[in-house]
Image: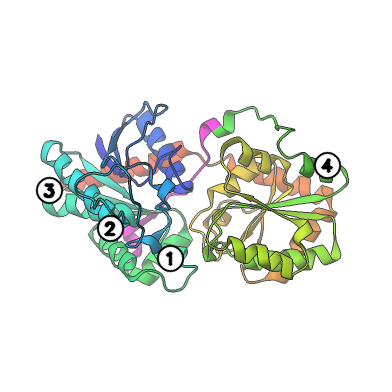
Amino acid sequence: MKILMLGWELPPHNSGGLGVACLNLSRALAKDGIDIDFVVPYEAKHENIKFMHVLSASHIDPLFRFGLGAYDSEKVEDLIIPDVHIPNAISKDQISIRQIQKTYCDFVDEYLMEFKPDLVHAHDWLTFEAGILAKKNYGIPLIVHVHATEYDRAGGNGGNPLVHEIEREGLVYADKILAVSNATKRIIHDKYDIPLDKIDVVYNSLDEDFLKQVYRLDKAQYKYLEALKSRGYTIVSTVGRFTIQKGLTHLLHAAAKAIRKNPKLIFVFAGDGEEKHELVNLAAELGISKNVIFTGFIRGKQLRDIYELSDIFVMSSVSEPFGLTALEAAHHGDVLILTKQSGVSEVLKSSFRYDFWDEDKLANEILAIAQSPALKDTLANSIRDEYRKISWDDVAQKCIKVYNDIDKHKQ
């Protein structure tokens, strides 16, 4: 079966978890014999990707370098980047997501004039218009894969009306919708009036290479944290973009409540984003700056070292469709505290859970784990048993079943 996969990023040229999920899903599908052409909107080398063909829709550099990652729906029209090499279809003076999407659609249109895949699998709103084009103009079945909605990115409120409209059109035109959690399925049904039987849930999993690696902590990287741990401090970490969606101001308020009762708590905020200065100032206002570390954006070994040093991982999101970072933290032995508004909490039942706004409960859960090594070990072992039961191979099998059902209906 030939699949045209439409995505916005692939590692190492990604700004977050969407590219990671697309890569691992595609690898698992290829293992089961699916022939994939994967279109990205930029031009870059993907030397480690041998299992599918990666096609570039334009000659611009990877988009996250320009602040146009897969999560930046607020920057649809207004980002100006002079003096970069760009195709004729994009203005020489300005790049916007809308301009890149037009070029992306033009590329897919030209592709489909020559090649006829069995179906199109489009990831998130950024590629939905190209998927709709394939269905309307060429009669190719369309699957849309929803990793997040604009309601998630906006923290449950508002968002970009244009993005909402593109999402709605993609969901309506799709032959089948894949959602990364039941929470996302409910949003698609409630906010966009899509029938529940049109939506299948396929959870994300962990990269098999990530699972197989024998990990050794770089002791030179975070000596300060290691020294604090040797003195009895508990390390609490969170990883992600500093946006309203992630609920980080609530986490800081909970941290202040917990630190007042247990000063031997260190909170590590790994990431960057528009809320960075607000969070740094809030930590100062709460009088906990000496207990809070902001690492900036990190990836690769630096990120894995944070997981390895951390005792507790908190996902404080207001709305998190899934949350791959929680699986990564669990693999490194972290105990997890997750909001009930995160999709990954549907999979990892042994985590502590709370409502994103309940700062008192979060503080109490942090204190309970920090004060009981036995509880910490029990939770970490239970979580490890749970995440090992899910795999990208299982996700691929569910996708292939959807592919086959659509193919039979087409015939």
Give the amino acid type for the residue marked by disc 1 in the picture.
Arg
SS class, disc 3: helix
Give the amino acid type for the residue marked by disc 2 in the picture.
Arg
Residue 56 in sight: yes
In x, y percent, where is residue 22?
Answer: 40, 42
- Name the front one of labels 2 and 1: 2
**Residue bearing the label numbered 3:** 138
- Name the front one of labels 2 and 3: 2
**Residue bearing the label numbered 2:** 98
In x, y percent, where is residue 256?
Answer: 76, 66
SS class, disc 2: helix
Give the amino acid type for the residue marked by disc 4 in the picture.
Ala
Q: Is residue 405 above or below residue 33?
A: below
Q: Is residue 214 above or below residue 307?
A: above
Q: Residue at the spot x=53%, y=66% of the render?
A: 244
In x, y percent, where is residue 72?
Answer: 42, 58
SS class, disc 1: helix
Q: CA distance from mark 3 to mark 1?
A: 31 Å
153 with respect to 262 (left or right): left
**Residue bearing the label numbered 1:** 186
Magenta stretch? 194-209
